[in-house]
């Protein structure tokens, strides 16, 4: 088993697992929510507890004010018996103080050290805090407009408020903590369940042999709990398919090279052995010429195989641009003129006087025309031999044709000749090619967004073909707009 990417890292350097990181983020978020929730409960609870106790304290102040009396000539007095005063001070958990002050601030009754607080103008009462004997008190100052005018002060300790608020915080905190534990465990189980397909995917890839490039089991991607894991499985399948295609192309290229070079190399070896077995210089020259021709055929086969391999991979990083097809075709035809003259072939061109712009790649287009002209010069030898390169346009495409006056092809074999190693009767009889030229042309045309078509020349019949027309459609850079039809 190969070592993983974290094999050389210490425990501190090794990055955490995905489930650990997600779980950590989830738990941290839940703890923060719990803390914020407790703070909100504390603030809201404190507000309503204070409001409830303050209202009760104000009610007691109003009840006390109802017992303040005064006559026409008598001063203010608190009309309560000692027993009623005891009942007023009674509280199961708090200590209560009170005082009554006259309009001039003179003490009337109650506890002298419970001072009144200033009441805002227009307000009837005012709540405030007060410290007495080291204890915190909550007091209310109730102002009664006369006659007579007086102020009642009620104060009590805050132990019950604090105790109630603490109980509220504890019970709500425990309830939230329980919910936190339940929710956290459920989320962690959900994370574990959702990440299990990812773990299964990782295990399936770890168990694979380097030579196993088959797609992942369909059940593995179908059972994925999330669309992201499914997309990851599909991306891995796509990568495996591309790697398999690349390896297949490499193996095929190696096999093609070995297959195609076996025959010329065997011929070269046989011719060299034959030359070494004779002392006649004329035999040596003849065999050397044969060796040179065999080397040329082998070199051409290797060049075609390399071109076909590049064509198979050309779709990955192919740069297309706008170019003048007529200029490119004219330059290529001129390069083939000396070879055509040496073979006594009449090589001509038509339709190159008009600018034709296509969206393509110069190297691929040159490869297309080179192979078509090479095939025409090899096989299209009529009497007298004649080859014509023509260029014309349709509404969306430029059509490049190479026409010869050779033996033509059987229409049933037209599509078959697009495949590798496929040759017609003429090619098999001459034995000069490997059956790769037209497959290269078809592949190049496909990469450029076009297509290749083979047909016999006009005047041919199914039983008597005469001449071959190889046509390549290439997309125009700007589609041709038809001229408007004028109606008289």
Image: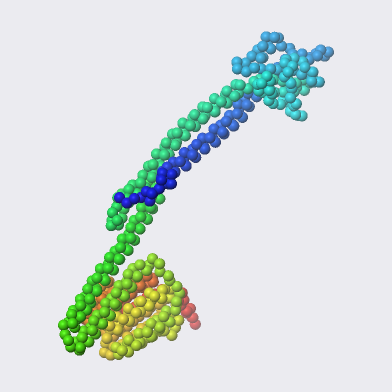
Which residue appears at 33% of the width and 75% of the height? 441
Residue drawn where x is 24% and y is 74% of the image: 261
Residue nearest the observer in this picture, 186 or 4: 4
Is residue 214 shown above or below 96?
below
Above or below 6: residue 213? below
Percent across and percent down for residue 95 are 64, 17
Left or right: where does residue 437 sit relative to residue 232?
left
Whole-percent x, y for residue 414 in the image: 27, 75
Quadrant of residue 402 within the rendered picture: bottom left
From the top left corner, tell me how far across and down residue 11 is, in percent. 41, 44
Q: Is residue 34 visible?
A: yes
Which colouring convention does the figure follow? rainbow
Quarter of the view holding residue 469: bottom left
The answer to whether residue 361 is above or below residue 460 is above
In the visual, does 236 lie left or right of 152? Answer: left
Residue at the farthest right position: 73
Judge whether residue 223 can be spotted in this image: no
Q: Residue furthest left?
A: 277
């Amino acid at each position: 088993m190969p070592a993983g990417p974290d094999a050389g890292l210490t425990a501190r350097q090794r990055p955490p697992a995905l489930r650990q990181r997600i779980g950590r983020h989830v738990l941290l978020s839940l703890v923060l929510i719990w803390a914020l929730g407790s703070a909100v409960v504390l603030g809201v609870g404190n507000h309503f507890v204070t409001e409830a106790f303050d209202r009760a304290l104000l009610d007691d102040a109003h009840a006390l004010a109802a017992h303040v009396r005064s006559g026409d000539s008598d001063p203010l007095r608190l009309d309560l018996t000692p027993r009623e005063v005891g009942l007023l001070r009674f509280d199961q958990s708090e200590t209560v103080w009170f005082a009554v002050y006259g309009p001039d601030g003179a003490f009337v009754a109650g506890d002298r050290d419970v001072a009144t607080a200033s009441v805002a103008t227009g307000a009837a009462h005012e709540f405030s805090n007060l410290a007495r004997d080291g204890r915190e008190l909550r007091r209310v100052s109730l102002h009664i407009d006369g006659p007579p005018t007086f102020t009642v002060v009620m104060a009590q300790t805050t132990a019950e408020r604090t105790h109630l608020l603490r109980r509220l915080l504890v019970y709500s905190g425990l309830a939230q903590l329980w919910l936190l534990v339940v929710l956290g465990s459920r989320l962690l189980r959900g994370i574990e369940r959702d990440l299990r397909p990812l773990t299964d995917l990782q295990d399936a890839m770890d168990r694979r042999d380097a030579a196993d490039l088959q797609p992942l089991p369909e059940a593995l991607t179908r059972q994925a709990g999330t669309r992201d894991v499914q997309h990851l499985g599909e991306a891995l399948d796509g990568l495996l398919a591309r790697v398999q295609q690349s390896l297949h192309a490499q193996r095929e290229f190696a096999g093609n090279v070995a297959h195609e070079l076996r025959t010329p190399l065997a011929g070269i070896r046989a011719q060299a052995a034959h030359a070494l077995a004779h002392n006649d210089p004329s035999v040596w020259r003849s065999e050397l010429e044969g060796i040179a021709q065999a080397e040329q055929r082998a070199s051409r086969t290797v060049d075609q195989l390399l071109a076909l391999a590049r064509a198979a991979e050309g779709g990955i990083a192919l740069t297309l641009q706008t170019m003048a097809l007529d200029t490119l075709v004219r330059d290529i035809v001129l390069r083939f003129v000396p070879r055509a003259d040496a073979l006594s072939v009449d090589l001509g061109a038509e339709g190159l006087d008009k600018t034709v712009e296509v969206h393509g790649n110069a190297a691929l287009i040159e490869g297309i025309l080179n192979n078509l002209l090479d095939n025409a010069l090899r096989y299209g030898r009529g009497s007298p031999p004649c080859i014509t390169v023509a260029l014309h346009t349709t509404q969306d495409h430029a059509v490049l044709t190479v026409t010869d006056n050779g033996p033509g092809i059987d229409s049933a074999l037209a599509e078959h000749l697009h495949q590798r190693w496929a040759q017609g009767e003429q090619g098999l009889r001459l034995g000069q090619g490997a059956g790769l030229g037209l497959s290269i042309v078809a592949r190049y045309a496909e990469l450029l967004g076009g297509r290749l078509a083979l047909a016999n020349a006009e005047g041919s019949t199914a039983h008597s073909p005469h001449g071959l027309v190889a046509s390549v459609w290439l997309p125009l850079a700007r589609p041709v707009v038809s001229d408007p039809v004028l109606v008289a």
